[in-house]
Amino acid sequence: MYLTRSGSRFRFQIRVPSDLTDKLGKTPIRLALGCVGVSRAQKIARLLAGQAEQLFIAVRSNELSGMKMVDLRGLIIEQLVEMLTATVDEAVETLALQENVRQKELKAFRLRHQKESFQREKEIEAKLKIVGEQIREVQERARTIEAGGIKDVRAELDGLAKMVALSLDGGPARPLLSDALEEWTNDIRYHEGIDAKKVRTDQNRITDFKDFAGDRPVNKYEFFDFQKFANLLSRVPSNYSKIPELRGKTRQEAADYNAQLDPDKRLDTLVGKSIEDNYLSPLRMFFRDMAAQHQFRSPLTDVIIRIPRDAKESTDRLPFEVDDLNKWFVHAVKQKRADEKWLPLLGAITGARVGELIFLQGKDLYPMMGPSGERYWVVDLRTDLTGENGAKEKRQIKNKPSRRLIALHEIFEQTGFIDYVRSRDASDYVFPAAFYHGKDRVEDPADAASKRMNRMLKKVGIHKTLENTFHSTRHNAKDAMRLAHVDERTHDLQSGHRLKTVSRRYGKKHLKTEEIEVLRAMPLPTGLDLSPYLKAFQKA
């Protein structure tokens, strides 16, 4: 059985079984199906094929005996045509039923639409009725208002107009920036546990903005004030107030002075990252707090202050070359001051920050016991400091991960640093000279120590502005731990870096004994020469 197709018309054809060719002939039995769909043609063909097989069986069983070949073929074709006609009639009836259903659905849809339209009209009519009543009420009141009443209405409207104008202008004036800044600094920032130097620096940066844009109520600043300030900062020489020819000049004057110099003689300006971190970040925080306190929208909400493209690019901090560290160690080991002698080695091996090392006290360094009774020396930054009168003082650290244990490499025992630490009392600073300049106590020991270290680097000849400073030793320590194949989570804990993934934040948040053992014995960078420290200890 198969179908043939010509355009959209199909024809059914079935082969006469070989055992019946003597009765029905060899010519296949064919029947035109007309214009029907493919799937329907296939269905009809299957029905006709089944009926034809039943008729072939009847011929074989001699149920149709006594008839001629032509009569037999005609009988079979006639019965197949009757089946085809019945099938088509059924299809027509089905289509009629489908059309009837469609008409009923269409009628139901029209009825629903009419009902909804009627309901909407009723709702509109009700609303119009309410509005009409309100209009009539207003008209009635208008007829009863006397001359004095009209004046009252006008006065009320004038008041409303002023309120609208005031609202469009940002609302009533809030405190001046200078007054709000003083209150915010003294009553809020100094009580947040932040380093006092950072608080003062932020206050000064916001004051710089006030000097540029003017001392206005805090809700009267606009986006352009901040964008223009950023544009100016990108042109101002860094540390311009310390440059003799620029002392006493405003930022605008300093920027204009720098711009008129020959390109190869222009002074270095602020880098884009410094503008963002040191100026714009404090301004965002200040105006966010002021907006919450005084109920206005901060002008820095949902806006981006763009750093000009010609702003100086940031300089990447780089680790020291091993040969440069060796030069530094040769110089440092000869120094009489303990901080000048030991800070270079401590920074390069542990990666600790200068501000963390300067405030170390005798109690902060102690041995931990290993599994077999070995002693592993550590620095503990998790405790408070002991003040001069024995009272506790909060240890100033950069962030939460900085409050940590630091493993000390065994080289600090071999070079005599541990012996030096043991000579200090528990409440004594390990580097007491760092707190004095002559007989005067320095205001910021960490800053003074950083400057002292950088002066030493310049003297040795390995200092590069921003690129190679004492902070570069943290990069050296990181490289050393990577080269020694120390687990990354372990050296993040050692360095006081934030654990960035959920997986790394699970588990103990400070070094375990096994990790301290690894860090204590890890191989140091190839070529790093510590013989100056070792020889000095042996001579002592």
Image (cartoon, rainbow, N blue to C red):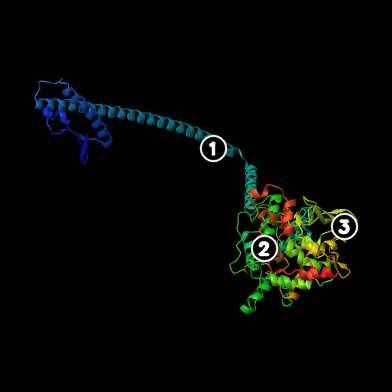
Say few, some or many: other residues with alpha carbon within 10 Å of mark 2 (under 14 / 14 to 19 / 20 or more). Answer: some
> Residues under labels 1 and 3: Cα distance?
85 Å
- Can residue 176 be seen from the camera position used here? no
- Would you name the residue on which mark 3 appears? 427
State which mark lies toward you, 2 or 3.
2
**Helix or strand or loop: what does disc 3 sit on?**
loop
Q: At 67% across and 63% down in the image, what residue appears? A: 479
Name which of mark 1 and mark 3 comes first in the sequence: 1
- What is the crowding at mark 3: few (fewer than 14 residues within 10 Å), some, or many (at least 20)? some
| Left or right: 218 in relation to 57 | right
Disc 1: which residue: 135
Report, in whole angstroms, how far the alpha carbon at label 1 lies from the one at label 2.
82 Å
Going from the N terminus, do you reach mark 2 or mark 3 first? 3
Disc 1 marks a residue whose amino acid type is Ile
In the rendered view, tell whether residue 198 sits above or below residue 154: below
Residue tagged by mark 2? Answer: 479
Q: Mark 3 belongs to which amino acid?
A: Ser
Q: Tell me, for residue 68, which label it has, or none.
A: none
In the picture provided, is 236 more to the left or to the right than 126?
right
Q: Are marks 1 and 3 in contact (CB under 8 Å)?
A: no
| Separation of marks 2 and 3 at Cα, in angstroms | 34 Å
Say what amino acid the circle numbered 2 marks: Asp
Q: Position of residue 373 (x, y in %)?
A: 80, 51
Marked residue nearer the N-terminal end (1 or 2): 1
